[in-house]
Image (cartoon, rainbow, N blue to C red):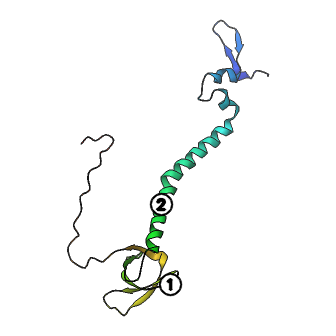
Amino acid sequence: MVPFLLDTVITPGGEAATETATKATQSSGLFGTWMADHPVMLIVIYCVVLLLIMYFLSIRPTQKKEKKLAELRNAVEIGDSIVTNSGFYGKVVDMTYDCVIVEFGLNRGVRVPVAKTEIFGVAEPNMSNEAPPVEEEPKKKGLFRRG
């Protein structure tokens, strides 16, 4: 291999010595000479690690939430009070494969077909003027908090 101009090191004694790039990088780096020989593989490994981090922080929790919501939608039965994605409270009167007939409001004659995918949860509307009581959750011990 022909030494490159940047591989030439001039010592104080005036002598010119050449070192190849592999000798200079052999002692440095996490993987030794492998990193110098395969720079594209380092980029591929970096991208795979980033995709794994994105999967575990973003995609997987969303999939769990969607699965839980699908189970809730499948568990809805006739007579349940539901909340739609738009915030309307109603009572399920009839069901089909992909549609639910819901009675909305105090006027019990209004029946509207709603897609099952629009059901957000099973809940009763709070018709009183008071806020519901808040249950205190036990404090979690943090990483740096004591107590």
Q: State the residue at coordinates (59%, 29%).
A: 30
**In the structure shown, which secondary structural element does the residue marked by tag 1 occupy?**
loop
Name the outermost residue toward the right: 1
* Viewer-side residue, 90 vs 20: 90
* Between discs 2 and 1, the one toward the N terminus: 2
At which x and y percent is residue 26?
Answer: 65, 23
Give left or right: position of 17 versus 27: right
Seen in the picture, residue 98 relative to 10 is either above or below; the reply is below
Q: What residue is pinned by disc 2?
A: 64
Q: State the residue at coordinates (50%, 61%).
A: 63
At which x and y percent is residue 7?
Answer: 70, 21
Q: Please rate how many residues cluster around mark 2, counting C-alpha atoms within 10 Å: few if below 14, some from 14 to 19, many from 20.
A: few
Which quarter of the figure is the C terminus placed in? top left
Quadrant assignment, res 38:
top right
**In the structure shown, which secondary structural element does the residue marked by tag 2 occupy?**
helix
At which x and y percent is residue 118?
Answer: 46, 76
Name the outermost residue toward the top: 13
Alpha-carbon distance for marks 2 and 1? 26 Å
Labelled pair 2, 1 in contact (Cβ < 8 Å): no
Q: What residue is pinned by disc 1?
A: 96
Camera-near label (2 vs 1) is 1
Seen in the picture, residue 61 relative to 96 is either above or below; the reply is above
Residue type at the position of mark 1 = Thr
Residue type at the position of mark 2 = Lys
* Viewer-side residue, 11 vs 94: 94
